[in-house]
Amino acid sequence: MNHNLDNVGIEDPHEPEVAPIQTNEGAEDGEVTKTGTTTVGLTTADGVVIATDMRASLGGRFVSNKDVQKVEQIHPTAALTLVGSVGGAQSFIETLRAESNLYETRRGEPMSIKALATLAGNLGRGGPFRAIHPILGGVDEDGHHVYSIDPAGGVIADDYTVTGSGMQVAYGTLEQYYEEGLSNEEAKEVAARAVKSAVERDTGSGNGVFLAEITDEGVEIEGHKDFDDVL
């Protein structure tokens, strides 16, 4: 894999490790809402493919929603996944989308994907967005890009990446099936297979798959309740 460190957040040594966890504001100690998920991003010969499961859960024990779209378009040719705190992730996406639109209005051209990733990392470094770990995928004149945005604000570019509670299982599948030069159609099958593998073992992931296909023409997102529709 090709690891490029574009922007690194500096972690406070006194901060605890941040998992995909949201602590309810004003809640008593121990009252913590946890969410799990599996999100996958792959670069392809045609662009980028992102896949996510469709389950929202509390602590991995109670399924609160079975039809959650965890990938959203935030730019003419880029999309971002939702991981961790639902409210924080939604606010994060709305902020990035607004900043991207404002940039394009002022300059007459879309923001580059690298600049968008750097902005995402800066927003993720502390504040209300710190309990999220999204994937940003996009296409621009410089190529096809997938970035992992960690909770400390670090931005890492790679050929493929996975975040969420099912990441270990999904990574194993990608290591087996991913290769350079996949078409978007081939990559959608590989990404869906990785999510399905995670769903089999991770209680925080499940109920189908959303697939986002990104090319220089735009972003298309489709949901599939049955993995057999794409495998």
Image (spheres, rainbow, N blue to C red):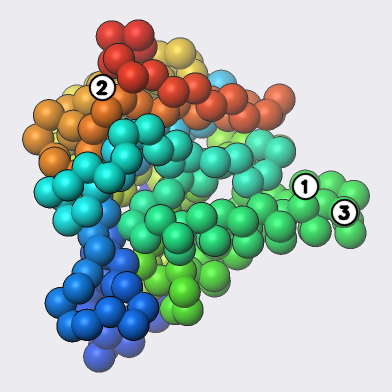
Residue 132, visible in the rendered structure: yes
- Mark with earlier residue (3, 1): 3
**Secondary structure beneath disc 3?**
helix
Rendering quarter of residue 59: bottom left
Say which amino acid is labelled 1.
Pro
Residue at the spot 77% in from the left edge and 47% down from the top edge = 110
Question: In the shown orientation, is residue 32 left or right of residue 95?
Answer: left
- Residue 105: which disc? 3
Q: Which residue is mark 1?
A: 110
| Percent x, y of residue 165 | 21, 49
- Mark with earlier residue (3, 2): 3
Mark 1 crowd level (few <14, some 14–19, many ≥20, 10 Å Cα) = some
Q: Quadrant of the C terminus?
A: top left
Q: Pointers 3 and 2 in contact (CB under 8 A)?
A: no
- Mark with earlier residue (1, 2): 1
Report, in whole angstroms, how far the alpha carbon at label 3 lies from the one at label 2: 39 Å
- Residue 193: which disc? 2
**Secondary structure beneath disc 2?**
helix
| Percent x, y of residue 223 | 44, 23
Residue at the spot 61% in from the left edge and 56% down from the top edge = 94
For the image shown, how many numbered marks are present on the structure? 3
**Secondary structure beneath disc 1?**
loop
Say which amino acid is labelled 3.
Thr
Q: Is residue 229 above or below residue 88?
A: above
